[in-house]
Image: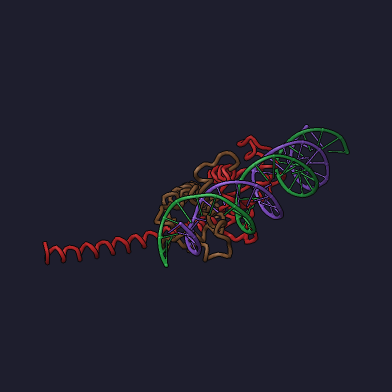
Chain colours: A red, B brown, C purple, D green
Amino acid sequence: MTVVDDELSLVFSALADPTRRAILERLALADATVNQLTELFALTQQAVSKHLKVLERAHLITRTRSGQARPCALDTERLDTAVGWIDRHRQVWADRHDRLDAHLENLRARQHQHEEKAP
Amino acid sequence: MTVVDDELSLVFSALADPTRRAILERLALADATVNQLTELFALTQQAVSKHLKVLERAHLITRTRSGQARPCALDTERLDTAVGWIDRHRQVWADRHDRLDAHLENLRARQHQHEEKAP
DNA sequence: CCTATACACAACCCAACAGTTGTACAACTG
DNA sequence: CAGTTGTACAACTGTTGGGTTGTGTATAGG
């Protein structure tokens, strides 16, 4: 993070906390109010509110107003972004392996040629 | 994190830093030594070594010894774990929407019935 | 053997973070 | 209208994190 505060850093560091992941897991099932979420943890309401603020800043949740309650809903768009980044580099790495496999295949083919020449 | 240090927290917090993500991006292309990685950033070798330690602790890279060099290689297994977690909850959320869509569809069907009765 | 190289370890600094308590405030409830 | 409920804001504390400098150490090369 430091100064950057780029999108991915916000998302990943939001996901880095077990409490926040638990909140997201809960919200995947159904929207919830701050108090409903607070009941899930051995934490004060204020602590949960702080976590929600982090999640909101990372655009992982959205919040509306419903009377005195302030329900939270999961927003999966940034999760797509995060998976996108990971997948991209998993893919490059996989391709690299493909290339390695191709390379080894190539070697093996030449090996056979040598064997034919001098068995 | 705090005390937990579970697998996912280690992975996500490792991914939360732009420098570390850049390191992984570089390693997706090819293995590299500490010095090679250091050249990429305006950082001291020690700072890069610290980042590598974090990545190693999260099992996102593996390190071997080759003479005096200590090459780093990407390890994609935990990336799978991370994507797994995200996907699981994206899926739950998507299913929830399916149910909502079904519900709305249901409502709409009934609405039509009413319209037929009293247009 | 001596020196340069590639890296790690240790101590320290400062900023950010997770948590707390205490309080303010707006919106429901009787 | 008074009291309760749901939530946010503020100030403080202890801990973690990224960065630095300074130093140690094993390996490679002349």
Query: Where residue A72 sits: x, y (%)?
Result: 62, 47
Can the viewer see residue B24 in this picture?
A: no
- Foreground of the two, B117 or B60: B60
- Foreground of the two, A76 or A118: A118
Can the viewer see residue A98 in this picture?
A: yes
Query: Where residue B103 sits: x, y (%)?
Result: 51, 47
- Foreground of the two, A12 or A59: A12
Q: Residue at x 52, y 66 (%)?
A: B39
Looking at the rendered image, the quarter that the N terminus of chain B falls into is top right
Label count reads: 0
Query: Where residue D7 sits: x, y (%)?
Result: 71, 45
- Foreground of the two, D15 or A66: D15
Q: Residue at x 52, y 41 (%)?
A: B6
Tell me: residue A65, above or below residue A38: below
Looking at the rendered image, the quarter that the C terminus of chain B falls into is bottom right
Name which quarter of the figure residue B73 lies in: bottom left
Query: Where residue B99 sits: x, y (%)?
Result: 49, 47
Tell me: residue A72, above or below residue A113: above
Name which quarter of the figure residue A6 lies in: bottom right
Q: Residue at x 42, y 58 (%)?
A: A90
Q: Residue at x 64, y 55 (%)?
A: A57
